[in-house]
Image: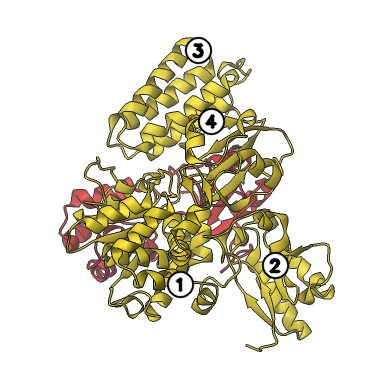
Amino acid sequence: MAGYPAWDQDSARSIIAGLAHLEGATLPILHALQEEFGHVDPQAVPLIAEALNLSRAEIHGAISFYHDFRTVPPPRRVIKLCRAEACQALGCEALVAHLAHDHGIVVDDHSGAADIAVETVYCLGNCALGPAALVDGELIGRVDAGRLAELCGSQVGSSHAGARA
Amino acid sequence: MNPVAIKIFVPIDAAALSVGAEGVAQAVLREAQARGVAIELVRNGSRGMLWLEPLVEVETAEGRIAYGPVAARDIAALFEAGFQSGGTHALRLGVTEELDWMKRQQRLTFARIGVTDPLSLSDYSAHGGLAGLKAALAMTGEAIVETVKASGLRGRGGAGFPTGIKWKTVHDAPAEQKYIVCNADEGDSGTFADRMLMEGDPFLLIEGMAIAAVAVGATKGFIYLRSEYPHAHRTLQRAILKAENAGILGDSVLGSGHAFRLEVRLGAGAYICGEETSLLESLEGKRALVRAKPPLPALQGLFGKPTVVNNVLSFSAVPWILQHGAKAYADYGMGRSRGTLPVQLGGNVRRGGLIELAFGISLREIIEDMGGGTLSGRPIRAVQVGGPLGAYLTAGQLDVAMDYEALASMKAMLGHGGIVVFDDTVDMARQARFAFAFCAKESCGKCTPCRIGAVRGVEVMDRIIAGTERPKNIAVLRDLNRLMTDASLCAMGGLTPMPVMSALNHFSEDFDRPLPALAAE
């Protein structure tokens, strides 16, 4: 996925202003900011709080409660790997072990500045064609070690011509 | 489009896309053009035979002929074999409607899915769409509510509460503003019916919600959709726009004078938002902490106003009921489980997918007859029904009927109708540990039994797996489960003991395994 523009207070402010009229606008605003910048910068907290007449604590609370929101820019590629029961029944945990052993990728490890991150997700609704993963908004079924290696490989980019809407 | 063009169907359902449907669609277009064959490519929903995806269909005088599973590289050979007129090829399956999987079903809610173009309103109307809403608009709100009540429809989201009674409460509550909220936070592992419905027939959900709005006097609705479903999100947004342009949504629903507007809102990766009160908190823009009940959402729901909160499948069952009558719906099913249930079969199963049937079929018929047993070919060992909070059943318990009460009598639950199959390589102590770990990760944190209990549960399971004082720790486990069941605020903490206790009671040998030589994961 292409890089995101650097955090910009003015454009953040205009995104917030464009959505502040919605009933319960907090999540739509957080999603819009993350879509624009790849993350929700902590500098957004006072802006949103002011626009919605809420406390900073309430906005911070929402950002930190939901698994989706990031407060730092994402790696170049994020692979969301399903580790719920249906995918467990088809060996997703062996894929997790394989990633660590053969590729040195620890699932859900956010400590380094890794180029590629694999994150746990619980259920992608593809339970009859698991193991499943979500990459750049596209669902991938019947993931095996080879496919996962391909997704993690640096050459990936546009090479998986399969599922593009 | 050329009127003599051959209609070819390639699904746009996310599961079909996940195994290459987009590449197949592109290959069909390329190959048809290269050969000068006039085709109309329809991107339909999935028929639910997911092991056959991508499933390509061709319209012929005989009916629609299915081919599958088709890869992009098969397309040239298919054209060569004359598949555009239903020709013979190794991938030819026959007339879609005549396939055993399709013939055995009773598709009411899913009747159109896989058949029509999901975003074509003319296709929708031509296949019975809007008939329920039109019938509802000729009735009083009270009469609509009575019809839903008489149909016996119970919420398909998991709790199984009678839908008509919920609607009656909202109908009778005096308020200047009421809301309709669709719970589309389908987070249970093993479930995908909501997703398939939203991607395959989004106008059906819109129609069902509009009927609810007219029935109770609500003017605003929200579909709270989980962020894990980006395809469904795009489809719903397009469908809502089309419905607005066609006057189905807006100031005057089909010219009736009833106003109803609808918005899709995305969740942000929190399983707890499938719980209705925490979903409402999230819609209001807050951390999704579960609310204590009472007050019921029907009386004080979204922004404190009377609110109908129902699952995608519950709303989507309503148009059929209004179109065909309450009795016609209630004639399906058994006991207090009336109508049909979209069953979702997944996990380690050869033929997984969606099956809509009247309540009452046994788990064994579904898994063995329709599903063909495990994908790995190994024996079935455990089956989890009803999502991550549902019980694990043994291969010997599969004769139970798919019915709310029948499963409850076995200390199991039907939930949202998801079935996940495991073969004999599964370690049930590890599955019990996972149930706690999942609860610990996804707990909203408001009540102590769930927040702390789940963490303690992981610790206790780790000790049991490691062989530390097993009898004592199993006693602690039972005690902890009782406490979580009795004292948790909602089903998250209250039902996590269900998978744990079923694993312990039915698969106790896994809690007493000889220790492995290495403590490797």
Q: In front: mark 1 or mark 4?
A: 1
- Residue A130, can we see it? yes
Horizontal side of A93 relative to B165 (left or right) equals: right
Q: Which of A140 and B179 is in front in this view?
A: B179
Contact check, label 3 and label 4, Cβ < 8 Å: no
- Residue at mark 1 to residue at mark 2: CA–CA distance: 29 Å
The residue located at (60%, 47%) in the rendering is B345
Q: Which of B429 and B43 is in front in this view?
A: B43
Contact check, label 3 and label 1, Cβ < 8 Å: no
- Residue at mark 4 to residue at mark 2: CA–CA distance: 37 Å
Q: Earlier in the sequence, mark 3 or mark 1?
A: 1
Q: Which amino acid does label 2 sit on?
A: Val
- Residue at mark 3 to residue at mark 4: CA–CA distance: 17 Å
Reading the image, the residue beneath label 2 is B56
- State the yellow chain: B
Reading the image, the residue beneath label 1 is B131
Contact check, label 4 and label 2, Cβ < 8 Å: no
Q: To which chain does the residue with label 1 belong?
A: B
- Residue at mark 2 to residue at mark 3: CA–CA distance: 54 Å
Q: To which chain does the residue with label 4 belong?
A: B
Q: In front: mark 1 or mark 2?
A: 1
The image quarter containing residue B383 is top right
